[in-house]
Amino acid sequence: MDKNLANSAPSVAATARKLVRRNSQTREILENCLGLVAVLILLIAVFSFATEHFFSFTTFTTIANQIPTAVLIAVGMTLVLIIAGIDLSVGSVLAVSGGVLGIALVHWHLPLLVAVLLSVLVGAFCGFVNGAITVRFQLPSFIVTLGVLEAARGAAYLVTNSQTQYIGAQIEQVNDITVFGLSLPFFVAIVGVVVGQLVLTGTVFGRYLIALGTNEEAVRLSGIDPRPIKIAVFTLSGALSGLASVAYCSRLASVDPNAGSGFELEAIAAVVIGGTSLMGGRGSVVNSLFGVLVISVLENGLAQLGAQEPVKRLMTGAVIVAAVIVDFYRSRRADRKAQAGN
Amino acid sequence: MTVLLKTQGLAKSYAGPVLSDVNFDLLAGEVHALVGENGAGKTTLSHIIAGLRTPDKGDMKLDGKPYAPANKRTAEEHGVHIVLQELNLINNLSVAENLFLEHLPNQAGWIRRSQLGKNAQTALDRVGLSDLDPNILVKRLGIGQKQLIEIAAGLSRQCRLLILDEPTAALTLADTERLMAQIKKLKAAGVGIIYISHHLDEVLDISDRISILRDGKLITTKGRGEITIDEMIRLMVGRNLEDSTARNDHRKFGSVLLHVDKLSAPPRVTDVSFDLLAGEILGFAGLMGAGRTETVRALFGADPRASGRIVLDGRDISSLIHSPSDSVRLGIGFLTEDRKAQGLLLPKPVRMNVTLARLTDELCGPGGWLRRARENSVADNWVQQLGIRCSSIEQSAGNLSGGNQQKVVLARWLYRDCRVLICDEPTRGIDVGAKFEIYRLLNQLAATGKGIIVVSSDLKELLALCDRIAVLSAGRLVRFFNRGEWTEDQIMAAAFSELTA
């Protein structure tokens, strides 16, 4: 009896380990976003009690239809931050892509799908330029994308003739497709988040991103060329900005040379609230979605409370800083854990 | 002459003891040289005297009074200065600012440029850099000039005790002579000088007394006339070596696996040529700065190389190796000397660290999908095979002991399955037990017909492990020794050869 028990104990333990391990990825993702979900629920609860109309279907569909642009950009930004880079050009790239979308629809009369593809390509090209220059000249991506932020804004003025233009009913179709009041861009953004998260945690490419952000020299000396990986990530970020421009333009049915200014900081804020490290090596795309939601709920709730723009911005700023402080302690704890035993 | 500094029973240990029971004294107006192998404890001793480290045991007396500097600053207040081996200059400041950084002449916070310039000129004159503009930025200078600036900074201070750690490592002959002249002047002024150098002829030339350190112990102190270079080397190496033959038996070597011809990577590597046989462990011995790491890094493609032919398995691959990814693809692996900075993903699990170099074949499923189940079993397998002690393959690598960390990096390359594995300092900072396990693993690997290059500062390790030892001196490969035909003295003599010639 005793012997049987002794024999079975390790095998039970092994089975348990296996089970835990199989689900560890999913569990990790869930555990990581638990804190953010709690914050989100708390915010919603507070605003629901404090205002009459916040807790309503309309509020939630409004928020859901507002966020696709920010979410798509945040997905790309998450990947860039994970490789310890930064992409400041996303807002301007969005404007250029939007401008091209407008020309393609209005002047060239291209079918909607082709026009969308074109604007994604324009975004990807800008991202490729970011990545290629960063890699080729070994510059900090901060500087390179700061330059492209400026240059792409110029390009956006050129393609739009410095004017906000109505680009027709065709683009509005994109928003007219709804399920339970949720627009097509919302679903595209969700798909983007899911795919982004799967790529990050499930593929070899995702593994390389995490490794690169953790210790680039170790990756290089392990025989993995970091250069194409970095270029790919920046290209992806650009392409997602292009896609985001479609969501942005469809909501307003127009293209705007000033579109997307300041989006880079909003995206970085959302991603950082989501716990992605600015130092690289650690992050989650799903959490960036929650980061966007936190900011969006905060803004909508404060608006319904009757808060003016200055107060809204003060509050949002405070939340961002608080999130970064939490992140600082979290990563310090992780570092301590890593250093213990040396 | 009076005794300036006296140490009694100084001891210091990190992972193991690096200094034990050192009784050392320095007279005023004396040049006292410290010589010894890499890691013998010269630098640690000088750092303790200069207040950069605190000893675990023992005490020091300066001028007969107790002296226990808490840091460099308090040591300097006592008139004890050190010129460090590594350069501590700030690249974006001028020569003059660097020279007087800690006591810039100023008036209410405003730097007095004219005074600073004058002081700098005097300091530069001392080291023979009269022609150098003190306002030039330090980053524009060559390494030799930087070294002289560092020395000038040390000389310009009011000091009674000056420590020079490898001051001539990057100096030309003329610069060295000028330095010697300055040292003689300081001596005449009653300053005590501790002189650390691998250049033994220089040591004989300048010092009044010579102390030899080995394994953290002060072996002996001799007057200048009482010792020759050969004797110094013999004492540094030590006679009582237990020939720890970790090598089990004589293996059969295959044909030439890797042929390297006239590999150069300025400034540290000049015309290095060697063959590596299949199944052979080839050691690279040499002093600090002899260019061993630089040689293997250039071979691996981690650093650019100026010229040289690399032939792997009879195929000229020189034109194919531009980066580490090329050499790994061709079957060369590289265990880096600094596992934390260049090897491990510290906060990441053991699993990720083991599989990193080989994710694209059997672990890669359709669509670039990572086969996690297979990755787990691969990691589990290597953890078991190498006896890596960790709570699970999900434990972060930073949590492991040094020896286990090293095994994780080794597992990465074993899993990558290379033809040639380069190991740079494979046992640095790990305990003896793990050391011998690493030796055993490398032996096993060689027995399967792989070629292994081991770079090590620990000569005993090379003696225990290698079939052949190549000795580098000042960037040149000076001599090969076959197993059984070497003595430590000969190897050390070869390591010094380009420096004393």
Image (tube, coloured by chain):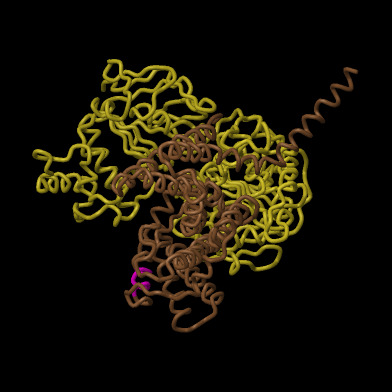
Chain colours: A brown, B yellow
Name the outermost residue toward the bottom.
A108
Indicate whether A112 appears above or below A232. below
* In the image: residue B152, left or right of residue B361: left
Indicate whether A234 appears above or below B406. below
* In the image: residue B448, left or right of residue B23: right
Work out which quarter of the rendered image holds the N terminus of chain A and state it: top right
Q: Position of residue B197 (x, y in %)?
A: 40, 39
Name the outermost residue toward the right.
A1
Q: Position of residue A93 (x, y in %)?
A: 42, 66
Residue A265: say if magenta. no
Indicate whether A224 appears above or below B209. below
Work out which quarter of the rendered image holds the C terminus of chain A and state it: top right
For the magenta stretch, what is the residue range?
A151-157
Res B329 → quadrant: bottom right
Q: Is residue A125 or residue A176 the one in the foreground?
A: A176
Q: Is residue B39 or residue B470 the one in the foreground?
A: B39
Q: Position of residue B382 (x, y in %)?
A: 72, 41
Give the overall secondary structure of the magenta segment.
Answer: helix
Indicate whether B476 appears above or below A245. above
